[in-house]
């Protein structure tokens, strides 16, 4: 599929044309920027041909309308779809969507949350819909990647009425963070879902993202793109009490305060320039304000990397991208110096000799460093093109009904754990088989002990496993007094320890999780329902006031499996689910992140 991608900013328009098939090939790259005095700077590139010129376009609308003629001049035709970067998609848009009138109206309502970005994004959408009315226009959202963030990340500790009004954290640069995390996994030769990555996007806008086992855990940006790092003209983290203080001291209105934080803060507020290259040059010449700005900038990034390593329980890689992250060896050095305690050390020569040609992702850590440090170009337009093509290629499956099983607290024991708890040579007694072939519940029970409390008569499920795994609900975790992560079964690295007590002894072992909701399904049912292993789907349960959608439910295709969805007791109670309940499958395909 040939996809035209628009990435419209407040003062620039970037575009690309990609052929998406078994491989992704970029056919055209161009852009317009620095709109002034009825003209702008333009550039285009296709194959070996590269040109820069001054174009007679006064604004973004005029430049967007001129794109068909530009593509024709460069011999680019056969466009089949148009993809648009949209910065803020709100809490519902976790996947690409067709931009019809209703969807555009919903996005326009989000403008107060991204006043620098969404108006420009939607202006390009409006022009493109007029110019190419026959083509599907698809929006891909910066916020979508971060919709996997847990409630402890997205929730502000403010009055309920504020939260009910929509006050929450979102996170941005999601398309970039998704792409570079996948590129880093590719460079390391490891599955993304086995890695703990901090993605560092440093450009005029800047953010850090904790990508934990393939999913966004947290991003430094919040409700709007103001929170987090120091940026070109945005403040980053700021005490909310600053508004009250400045209103009383300087008489600033809300509008003046907000405008200053977006347009006159960050590097610009500290030095008068939003360009890191200027700031670095001035710092080298002895400018004290520029020196402070660079020190503050690097400190803020370093602080977030350390915080996110702690949030993930470890760190495998730091990935730098964006204009500053890709091009400033000195900024990478400033950020990484001081992180040696985490096992991260840079190699001076590798850091100074970074080459990013042909999608390279060089590693610049010192030999022996436990944490990889990678530099790579972000490719947001390529990522958008992939997601657009995947969205349009997906054939909607008919509504499907699926049984739902409620999984209470239980343990899966290893042979060593069984011997320690019940004695050497002990064999569990099968009480009754489970619906998943080969699985059964044992007659025996164990107790779990945490710092706050104890759970008794905990079921044991067989057969034995290579590694002990303990599955509890979120409520159980509070009864125990332990912060228990939500994990897919078998993903036990970095999980907390728990004491298990049996009749012959006790053990302290890791492997304590809240099991992520999932669907067991056999290949035949998967083919009939149009599902694939590893896919994520939404499942709707109930109707009326108690209706609930279980989002991002992982599909596990296994030969001989009994097809059913597994949820824990907390989820069942929230949905009022009892025996014999069924849910309706609402397929939701994750955005493409590789290839």
Image (cartoon, rainbow, N blue to C red):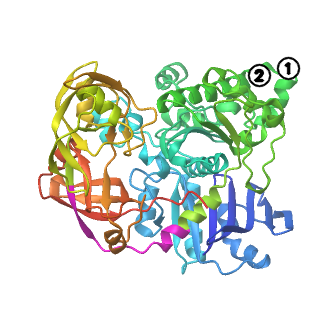
Number of other residues with Cα within 10 Å of mark 1, as a class: few under 14, some 14 to 19, many 20 or more: few
- Residue occupying image coordinates x 73% and y 77%: 76
Q: List x then y, in percent, for residue 352.
A: 83, 36
* 506 lies above or below 42: above
Q: Is residue 387 left or right of residue 398?
A: right
Residue at the farthest front position? 425
- Residue occupying image coordinates x 35% and y 64%: 559
- The answer to whether the residues at label 1 and label 2 have Cβ atoms under 8 Å apart is yes
> Where the N terminus falls, by quadrant?
bottom right
Q: List x then y, in percent, for residue 86.
A: 54, 56
Find disc 2 in the rendering and name its residue: 291
Q: Say if residue 267 shows up in the picture.
A: yes
Q: Earlier in the sequence, mark 1 or mark 2?
A: 1
* Residue 206 found in image quarter: top right
Secondary structure beneath dot 2 equals helix
Residue numbers of the magenta segment: 389-404
Find disc 1 in the rendering and name its residue: 286
Q: Is residue 57 left or right of residue 410?
A: right
* Residue 417 found in image quarter: top left
* Picture disc at residue 460: none
* Residue 570 found in image quarter: top left
* 211 lies above or below 32: above
Q: List x then y, in percent, for residue 204.
A: 68, 41
Q: List x then y, in percent, for residue 546.
A: 17, 52
- Residue occupying image coordinates x 66% and y 61%: 60
């Amino acid at each position: 599929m040939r996809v035209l991608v628009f990435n419209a900013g407040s003062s620039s328009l970037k575009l690309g044309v990609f052929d998406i098939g078994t491989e992704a090939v970029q056919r055209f790259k161009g852009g317009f920027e620095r709109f002034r005095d009825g003209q702008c700077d333009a550039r285009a590139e296709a194959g070996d041909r590269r040109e820069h010129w001054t174009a007679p376009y006064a604004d973004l609308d005029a430049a967007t309308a001129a794109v068909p003629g530009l593509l024709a001049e460069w011999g680019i035709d056969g466009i089949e779809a148009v993809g648009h970067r949209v910065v803020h998609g709100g809490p519902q848009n976790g996947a690409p969507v067709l931009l019809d009138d209703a969807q555009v109206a919903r996005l326009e309502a989000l403008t107060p949350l991204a006043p620098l970005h969404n108006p420009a994004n939607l202006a390009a959408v409006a022009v493109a819909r007029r110019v190419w009315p026959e083509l599907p226009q698809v929006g891909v959202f910066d916020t979508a990647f971060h919709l996997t963030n847990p409630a402890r990340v997205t929730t502000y500790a403010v009055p309920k009425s504020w939260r009910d009004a929509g006050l929450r954290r979102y996170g941005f640069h999601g398309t970039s963070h998704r792409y570079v995390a996948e590129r880093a996994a590719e460079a390391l030769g490891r599955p993304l879902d086995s890695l703990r990555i901090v993605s560092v996007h440093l450009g005029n806008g800047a953010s850090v993202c904790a990508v934990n086992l393939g999913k966004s855990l947290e991003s430094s940006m919040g409700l709007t793109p103001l929170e987090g790092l120091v940026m070109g003209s945005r403040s980053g983290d700021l005490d909310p009490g600053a508004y009250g203080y400045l209103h009383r001291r300087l008489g600033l209105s809300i509008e003046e305060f907000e405008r200053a934080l977006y347009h006159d803060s960050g590097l610009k507020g500290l030095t008068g320039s939003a360009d890191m290259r200027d700031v670095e040059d001035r710092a080298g010449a002895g400018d004290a304000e520029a020196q402070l700005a660079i020190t503050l900038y690097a400190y803020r990034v370093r602080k977030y990397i350390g915080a996110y390593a702690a949030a993930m329980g470890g760190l495998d890689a730091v990935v730098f991208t964006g204009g500053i992250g890709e091009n400033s060896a000195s900024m990478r050095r400033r950020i990484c110096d001081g992180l040696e305690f985490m096992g991260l050390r840079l190699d001076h020569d590798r850091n100074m000799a970074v080459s990013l040609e042909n999608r390279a992702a060089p590693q610049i850590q010192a030999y022996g460093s436990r944490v990889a440090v990678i530099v790579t170009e972000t490719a947001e337009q390529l990522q958008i093109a992939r997601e657009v093509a995947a969205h349009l290629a997906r054939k909607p499956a008919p509504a499907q009904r699926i049984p739902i099983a409620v999984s209470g607290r239980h343990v899966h024991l290893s042979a060593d754990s069984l011997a320690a708890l019940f004695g050497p040579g002990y064999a569990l007694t099968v009480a009754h088989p489970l619906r998943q072939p080969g699985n059964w519940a044992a007659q025996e029970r164990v107790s779990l002990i945490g710092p706050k409390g104890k759970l008794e008569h905990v079921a044991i499920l067989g057969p034995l496993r290579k590694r002990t795994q303990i599955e509890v609900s979120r409520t159980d975790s509070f009864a125990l007094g332990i912060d228990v992560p939500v994990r897919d079964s078998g993903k036990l690295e970095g999980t907390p320890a728990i004491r298990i007590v049996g009749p012959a002894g006790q053990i302290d072992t890791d492997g304590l999780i809240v099991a992520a909701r999932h669907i067991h399904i056999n290949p035949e049912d998967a083919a009939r329902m149009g599902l694939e292993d590893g896919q994520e789907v939404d499942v709707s349960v109930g109707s009326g006031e108690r209706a609930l959608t279980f989002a991002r439910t992982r599909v596990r295709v296994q030969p001989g499996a009994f097809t059913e969805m597994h949820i824990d007791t907390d989820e069942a109670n929230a949905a009022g689910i009892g025996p014999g309940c069924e849910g309706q499958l609402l397929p939701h395909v994750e955005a493409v992140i590789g290839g």
